[in-house]
Structures are given as structure tokens and as C-alpha cells.
Amino acid sequence: MSDNFTYDYSAAQNVEAERIMRKYTGGAKEYSDIEKLRRLDRKAEGPGQVAAMTVGIIGTLVMGAGMSLVMVMNSLIIGIILGVVGIVVMLAAYPIYKKVTAAQREKVRDEILAISERIKAGQQGE
């Protein structure tokens, strides 16, 4: 009878072990092409999301200040003006997102296309 004990870890446990190992090895890891593609896509969308969220939050706060003026301070005219300004600022969030994201996508466009072509070429060869 053998005294050897073996245990196979699941895929999720292997991923967790690799993630923990990277913390202690300086995080150096070679990414596959599809992982690089995903990272570049997130990199292109991130700044647009941050800009849109910031503008949206500012617009919400301005509109809320206008509502507070109307409801609590009885400053109807100033409150309505602030509320409308806040709504306009909130409405600007999506166009800002689109503009910033388009600019970021243009920056990473060539690299994304090169990686995509490499992935497609590798799949056709199989």
C-alpha cells in the first residue's frame, strides 16, 4: 500500500493560488492576448466613466441644492434656476462619456486591432 497522498485542486483554487502568489512575486505575469485585449478595452472606457460619473454627481448635487432651496428656504426662483442648471449638467454626462471614451479608444485602436488580428490568425490556423 502506498503512503503517498495526492490532491488535485479545482480551477478556481488554482486561480486563487496564482493570484496570491503574484502578490509575493511582484505581480509580474505574462498576459494572454485575450487578457491584453480586455485590459485595453477597460483602459479605454475607464476615463470616460470617471468623467461622466463626476459630472453626473456634480449635477445631482446642484439639482439637490435647488430642491432644498425651494422646499426648505422658500427661495422659489433661485431654487428652480439651480435645479434646471443641475439637470442640464446631469444631461451633459453622457455626451462627455462618449467624447472621452472615443478619444481613449482612438489612442489604443492600433494596439487593439493588432492583437485582434493576431487572435483571429491563431484561430484560423487551428
Image: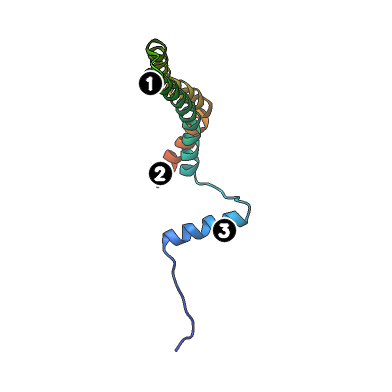
In the image as oriented, which residue stretches furthest toward the right?
Answer: 26
Foreground pick, 41 / 89: 89
Tag 3, which secondary structure? helix
**Mark 3 to mark 1 CA distance (whole Å):** 52 Å
Q: Sequence order check: which comes first, mark 3 or mark 2? A: 3
In the image as oriented, which residue stretches furthest toward the bottom?
Answer: 1
Name the amino acid type tagged 1: Met
- Residue to which mark 3 is pinned: 21
- Residue to which mark 1 is pinned: 67
Name the amino acid type tagged 3: Met
Tag 2, which secondary structure? helix
Using the image, tell me which numbered label, if any, was put on residue 101. none
Q: Sequence order check: which comes first, mark 3 or mark 1? A: 3
Q: Quadrant of the N terminus?
A: bottom left
Tell me what residue is drawn at x 60 percent, y 51 percent. Answer: 27
Query: Which mark lies nearer to you, 2 or 1?
Result: 1
Using the image, tell me which numbered label, if any, was put on residue 123. 2
Foreground pick, 3 / 78: 78
Report whether residue 94 is seen.
no
Foreground pick, 118 / 8: 8
Foreground pick, 42 / 2: 42
Q: Residues within 10 Å of mark 2 (few under 14, many from 20)?
A: few
Apparent side of residue 92 relative to residue 22 in the rendered image (left or right): left
Tell me what residue is drawn at x 36 percent, y 21 percent. Answer: 71
Name the amino acid type tagged 2: Gln
In the image as oriented, which residue stretches furthest toward the top?
Answer: 77
Residue 53 on image: x %, y %: 45, 28
